[in-house]
Amino acid sequence: MKRKSRARIPEGRPLIAPSLLSCDFSRIAEEVRAVEEAGADLLHVDVMDGHFVPNITIGPLIVEAIKRHARTPLDVHLMITDPDRYLAGFAKAGADILTVHWEACPHLHRSVQAIHDLGLPAGVSLNPATPVWLLKDILADIELVLVMSVNPGFGGQRFIPQALEKISELRAMADEIGCTDLRIEVDGGVTKDNAAQLVAAGADMLVSGSAVFTSGDYAGYIAALRG
């Protein structure tokens, strides 16, 4: 099952998306260039509102600033209440992929449709306690599922092992209904020590923040994540 907007997500498996939440924001342009030169496939941008999650990060103006320096796609993850109000603003700012949370969207199909109307691939994220089966009726309409392997809101948390089972279950469900091109992304506690397990379970997009930006060797760490 192919989707027109699918082409906007880079090819390859696994794709590595350093999370800019963990970069040095006083040097963000340099950090963007550094991880891109080190081999990043995408840049993961965590948007938090202090309401849906207990932290506040960035808005469209910062995304627009990042876009001016980025050569790789911006993978924008909206951890916010009522994301529909902000989809157009983030698209205009330069998002190349928009992901909303199942838990934040009472009319999820409408939210996905709105992202597609903006010409972007649509992703849906699941918190650790949200079961995979809840996506069954939307899976054919989206390009990406983001499995949270920590509770969203802060970087540097410990990986929740149950995410591996969720990834496997999600990949099996996608294959069963013919969504063979669905991208499965995982975010939270992703390191070089568990990356291979995540890919083996069915993930093909790995978000890693603290591990990359504290490694002292961006290129080496990204290569290790890629396996």
Image: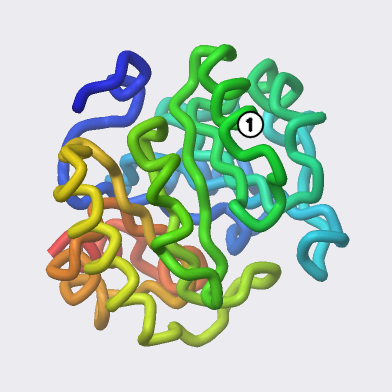
**Residue at the disc numbered 1:** 111
Q: Residue furthest front?
A: 137
Quadrant (top left, top right, bottom left, bottom right) of the N terminus: top left
Q: Nearer the viewer, residue 198 or 15?
A: 198
Residue at point 32%, 40% (across, down): 41
User: Is 197 drawn above or below residue 14 in the view shown?
Assistant: below
Q: Amino acid at mark 1?
A: Ser
Q: Nearer the viewer, residue 57 or 86?
A: 86
Residue 17 appears in the figure: yes
Which percent across, then down, holds residue 180? 16, 39
User: Is 26 drawn above or below residue 160 in the view shown?
Assistant: above
Residue density around tag 1, few if under 14, some if 14–19, many if 20 or more, within 10 Å: many
Residue 213 appears in the figure: no
* Residue 64 located left or right of residue 218: right
Label 1 element class: helix
Quadrant (top left, top right, bottom left, bottom right) of the C terminus: bottom left
User: Is 208 drawn above or below residue 115 in the view shown?
Assistant: below
Q: Residue furthest right?
A: 51
Residue at point 56%, 22% (across, down): 113
Quadrant location of residue 12?
Answer: top left
Which percent across, then down, holds residue 108? 61, 39
Which percent across, then down, holds residue 47? 70, 48
Callout count = 1
Which percent across, then down, holds residue 125? 52, 54
Residue at point 55%, 41% (across, down): 99
Q: Nearer the viewer, residue 20 or 80?
A: 80
* Residue 171 located left or right of residue 53: left
